[in-house]
Amino acid sequence: MANIVDRTSAEVLIPKEESDQIISNIIEKSAFLKMATKLPNMSSMTREYPVQASEPIAGFVSGDTGLKPTTGMDWKNSVITAEEIAAIIPVPDNVAADSKFDIFAQLRPQLEAAAGKVVDKAAFFGTNKPDSWPTAIVTAAIAAGNVVYTPASGADMYKEIFGVGGVIAKVEEDGYFVDGMVSAMNMRAKLRDLRDKQDRPLFVQDMHNATPYTLGGITMEFPRNGSFNAETANLIAGDFTRAVYAIRQDVTFKVFDSGVISDADGKVIYNLMQNDMKAIRMVIRLGWQVFNPHNSLNETEATRYPFAVYSPNLQPQRYARTGVAALSDNAEPVTQKKC
């Protein structure tokens, strides 16, 4: 026995302060669902919207008795299909009982954020997207020629985004106005260096609006949920009134105290009753679409799209819209195009 009462010998007598808060990551929901236009909830799995595919053409009449020209107009259906996103987390009863926190209350917002990450990755980049969902925004924009590639050196980011032939201009050439941008977190430092001709910063924080950041007056979002693929896109700009989504079943949670959890082969992994466990299940069903109706500024559907991409892929020059091959989701952007 030591001749001193030190911290080791009195450890059991010293109370330990324990935090009554859990430190977790910032809960971020879907950037796509935040910026896109929400349509009324769906009452079935699919919903069709007639979208203008052509426009009538008027003409002059020759003389007092000349024949008035005839014209036509047609529409096509654009379909929104609801798909299910879900997750299950099992928790042993003893673990839940011994915890001084409500574990299931902690899991709910995290599961909701996980669903938002799935939506963002599928809608923007096509990652693991269902076949019924439309082509991802980045993939479709590149296929339409709405892409500006970062040069190997000497890039003028201001011109690449705001200038002639820049990202915003490509959207405007298709008859749309850019009202929002989504960008990678590693772009923030570069954007802070952007200045206009009067040396005023373009990337500013607006403390008076709900959206904290704007670039040249355009709303910006920087997803922190790990959904943004910075290797494919530095920045996505577009008309988010044309990106729409609809909810078939809003996010729901249910806690089960019986049942089995099995793998893809049908092998039982957990038997909730036998293993003394509970499981929380999150489910949401929704669908989305990009409306791209005919307009007079660009009548060619293959090269008309309401979004454009600023890509980090090194290219020797900016390419024209023609000669752009279609891309599949998750494919590498085409690097050889007609100048």
Image (cartoon, rainbow, N blue to C red):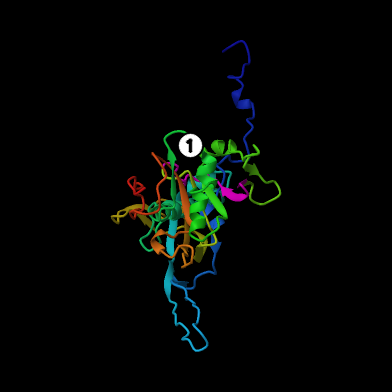
Dominant secondary structure, magenta: loop
Residue shown at 32% from the left, 46% from the top: 336
Q: In this view, does 96 lie above or below 74?
A: above
The answer to which of 332 and 168 lies nearer the viewer is 168
Q: Is residue 193 above or below residue 273?
A: above
Residue shown at 66% from the left, 52% from the top: 210
Q: Does the magenta stretch include residue 223?
A: yes
Q: Report the magenta residues as a range.
A: 214-231
The answer to which of 307 and 128 lies nearer the viewer is 307
Residue shown at 54% from the left, 50% from the top: 181
Q: Is residue 197 magenta?
A: no
Q: Which amino acid does label 1 sit on?
A: Ala
Q: In which quarter of the image is residue 177?
A: bottom right
Please state the horizontal and vertical placement of residue 59, each as a whole percent of the image. 49, 77
Q: In which quarter of the image is residue 19?
A: top right
Q: Quadrant of residue 77?
A: bottom left
The answer to which of 135 and 108 lies nearer the viewer is 135
- On the question of residue 169 being in view, the answer is yes
Q: Residue at the bottom extreme?
A: 65
Left or right: residue 325 compared with residue 50: left
Residue that label 1 marks: 155
